[in-house]
Amino acid sequence: MTTIFSKIIAKEIPADIVYQDDWVTAFRDIHPQAPTHILIVPNKEIATVNDVFPEDEAILGRMFVVAKQIATEQGIAESGYRLIVNCGADGGQEVYHLHMHLVGGRKLGRMLPN
Ligand code: AMP
């Protein structure tokens, strides 16, 4: 299923892209929840974590390497940050193109509400 993220990756619609290579694209979330809120997205159309297969392991690994690189560039590697991947309806996933939220720049508090 093609989503708005594929259009961002293809640069068919504007986004604040902070990183792109052959495997992943990272851009600022349009509704940031913290001073730093960046989405790291595989260029390949993978809908959810449920649609990940062993052949995607290199892409998934690249997402973490890029997350660390961006966190360092954004100056939040030392203070800390959170990586979030929502899956499906109960997970709160809105866009069905796998993505990792990189959130930081302030104290984030508890991971989940009580
Ligand atoms: P999720 O709930 O995990 O699916 O998160 C989807 C995220 O995508 C939300 O935080 C949205 O604010 C963000 N988002 C949706 N459309 C855009 C867009 N065009 N550019 C940047 N971020 C977007």
Image (cartoon, rainbow, N blue to C red):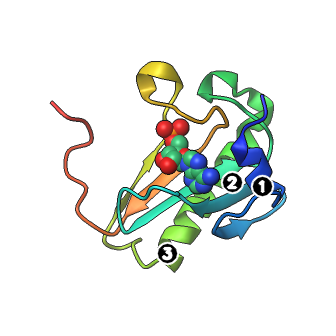
Q: Residue furthest front?
A: 13
Q: Which residue is mark 1?
A: 9
Residue 78 coordinates in the image, percent (x, y): 35, 73
Q: Relative to the observer, which residue lies in front, 18 or 55?
A: 18
Q: Is mark 3 within 8 Å of ligand 1?
A: no
Residue 112 coordinates in the image, percent (x, y): 25, 36
Residue 20 coordinates in the image, percent (x, y): 75, 65
Q: CA distance from mark 2 to mark 1?
A: 16 Å
Name the N-terminal-most of marks 3 and 1.
1
Which picture quadrant has residue 56? top right
Would you say residue 100 is visible in this rendering? no
Q: Which residue is mark 2?
A: 62
Q: Which residue is mark 3?
A: 72
> In the shown orientation, is residue 94 left or right of residue 50?
left
Q: Relative to the observer, which residue lies in front, 16 or 81?
A: 16
> In the shown orientation, is residue 90 left or right of residue 46?
left
Q: CA distance from mark 3 to mark 2?
A: 15 Å
Q: Say above or below: 110 vs 104.
A: above
Amino acid under label 3?
Thr
Residue sitting at x 68%, y 54%: 62
Residue sitting at x 31%, y 71%: 79
Q: Secondary structure at mark 3?
A: helix
Amino acid under label 2?
Arg
Quadrant in the picture for the C terminus:
top left
Q: Relative to the observer, which residue lies in front, 47 or 71?
A: 47
Q: Residues within 10 Å of mark 3 (few under 14, many from 20)?
A: few
Q: Secondary structure at mark 1?
A: helix
Amino acid under label 1?
Ile
> In the shown orientation, is residue 25 left or right of residue 76?
right
Residue sitting at x 71%, y 44%: 4
Query: Do the residues bearing badges 3 and 1 touch, measured as CB atoms within 8 Å?
Result: no
Would you say residue 24 is visible in this rendering? yes
